[in-house]
Image: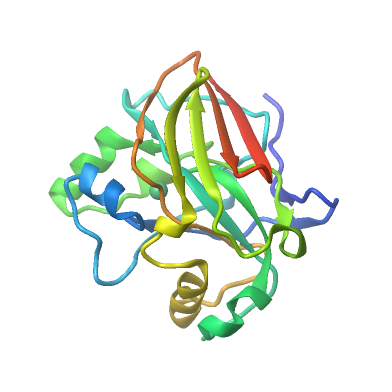
Amino acid sequence: MSIHSIQWSFSDGTAIPIGTMYCIGRNYAAHAREMGAEVADDPIVFLKPPAAYRNNGSVIELPRWTNDVHHEVELVVVIGADCVDVHENDAWNYVAGIGVGLDLTARDVQTAARKNGHPWAVAKAWRGSAPVSAIVPANECGRGPWDLRCDVNGTQRQYSSTDKMERSVEQLISYLSGVFTLQRGDCIFTGTPEGVGVIVVGDYVRASLSTLTTLEVNIV
Ligand code: MG
């Protein structure tokens, strides 16, 4: 197996080392409902390590300890400069670019963790759980909204718009930078819309962000 890249791949050739991956839970009301949950008062935040990343075109090996890995298509925002306590109005000054990613989730393990009040790290942060497309530089992507789509074996599973996010990109950067120090190369997985579902060995998954960028992975 080849060594995977640990740098963001920008469509204009920029390369930035991948840092902490901040992930937001339940940021679309319709997905919260399909999980039998509500949108929380404060953002639900969990982390993935850089080694969870895979680039476009990767082959992703499902873990042996789960039989229920779900696709969650998400807008991914890459941070371009270190920041603390950013005001919403300044948030886009700290964005290097955007892409589309899959927050691959071992749902069976997550459900057990939720029931027991345990952390989600194993369910969410396993190696290969964070494939992301090439990143579109911030000066080429506009400010949205963008369409999010996920197809499995050519059949549409998820289709929504980032205008359905409960908390905007600006609000998430402001919130996260108030708690953590966001650093150049960190990213934010901004949550998934409804339509999540299982993927199995042999599946081909294609995710897209409007017509800006796509992510294609094969599951083994
Ligand atoms: Mg997610």
In the rendered image, the residue lying farthest to the right is 13
| Residue reaching furthest to the left | 115
Residues 127 and 99: in front is 99
Report which quarter residue 52 is drawn in. top right
Q: Nearer the viewer, residue 205 or 119?
A: 205
Q: Is residue 151 above or below residue 7?
A: above
Residue sitting at 50 percent across and 27 percent down?
151
- Residue 133, image x and y in percent? 65, 42
Question: Looking at the image, is 206 positioned above or below residue 81?
Answer: above
Coloring applied to the structure: rainbow
Residue 39 as seen in the image, left or right of residue 55: left
Which of 12/2 is in front? Answer: 12
Q: Residue at x 63, y 50 (%)?
A: 99
| Left or right: 84 as drawn, with respect to 11 | left
Which of 170 and 13 lies nearest the eye of the viewer?
A: 170
Residue 118 image position (x, y, % from top left): 22, 52
Q: How many marks?
A: 0
Q: Determine whether 108 is above or below 14 in the image.
A: above
Q: Is residue 166 left or right of residue 35?
A: right
Point 70% across, 34% down: residue: 3
Residue 119 % position (x, y): 28, 54
Check the picture and name the quadrant holding the N terminus. Answer: top right
Left/right placement of residue 63 relative to residue 138 reads left
> Dividing the picture into quarters, in which one does residue 40 lie?
bottom left
